[in-house]
Image: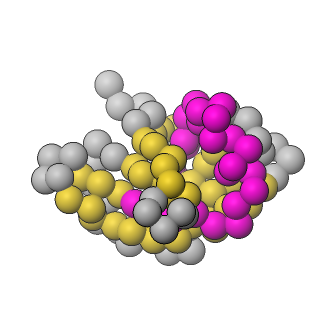
């Protein structure tokens, strides 16, 4: 399943680590397994959360793109806005690629 994430932040935490802060509409019941972000330096990145879940990170802020290109991993936090709690926290490997794959045909659009 591929989902599009439009509401997220890339922040620096108190330990000076970059952190991807996700606020998904629906919290996954599946655990992240070997999470990996593919990034080509452009506006979008792909987070492979596990073998069944892929998240498109749309419209990365231009101010964060250079930082993301220099990382080998990033702390990923999933936050439930309804309960105001952190649901998952894990390290995602960051892999820089020449071009991220076009997975738009498999995208699940929420209306």
User: Residue sitting at 59 percent across and 33 percent down?
Assistant: 61
Q: Which residues are magenta?
A: 54-77
User: Residue sitting at 71 percent across and 66 percent down?
Assistant: 72
Residue sitting farthest toward the left: 83
User: Residue sitting at 29 percent across and 42 percent down?
Assistant: 25
Answer whether residue 86 is visible to the viewer in this image.
yes
Q: Is residue 59 left or right of residue 70?
A: left
The image position of residue 96, as x and y in percent, is: 78, 55
Quarter of the figure with the C terminus = top left
- Which of the 4 quarters of the picture holds residue 77? bottom left
The image position of residue 108, as x and y in percent, is: 44, 38
Q: Is residue 57 left or right of residue 30?
A: right
**Image: 74 above or below 64:** below
Residue sitting farthest toward the top: 111
| Of 44 and 108, the residue lying toward us | 44
Q: Is residue 102 left or right of residue 79?
A: right
């Amino acid at each position: 399943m591929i989902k599009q994430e439009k509401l997220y932040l890339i922040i620096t935490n108190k330990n000076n680590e970059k952190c991807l802060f996700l606020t998904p509409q629906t919290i996954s019941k599946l655990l992240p397994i070997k999470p990996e972000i593919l990034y080509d330096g452009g506006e979008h990145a792909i987070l492979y959360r596990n073998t069944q879940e892929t998240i498109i990170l749309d419209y990365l802020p231009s101010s964060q793109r250079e930082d993301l290109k220099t990382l080998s991993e990033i702390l990923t936090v999933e936050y439930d806005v309804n309960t105001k709690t952190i649901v998952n926290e894990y390290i995602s490997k960051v892999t820089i690629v020449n071009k991220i794959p076009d997975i738009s045909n498999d995208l699940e659009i929420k209306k």
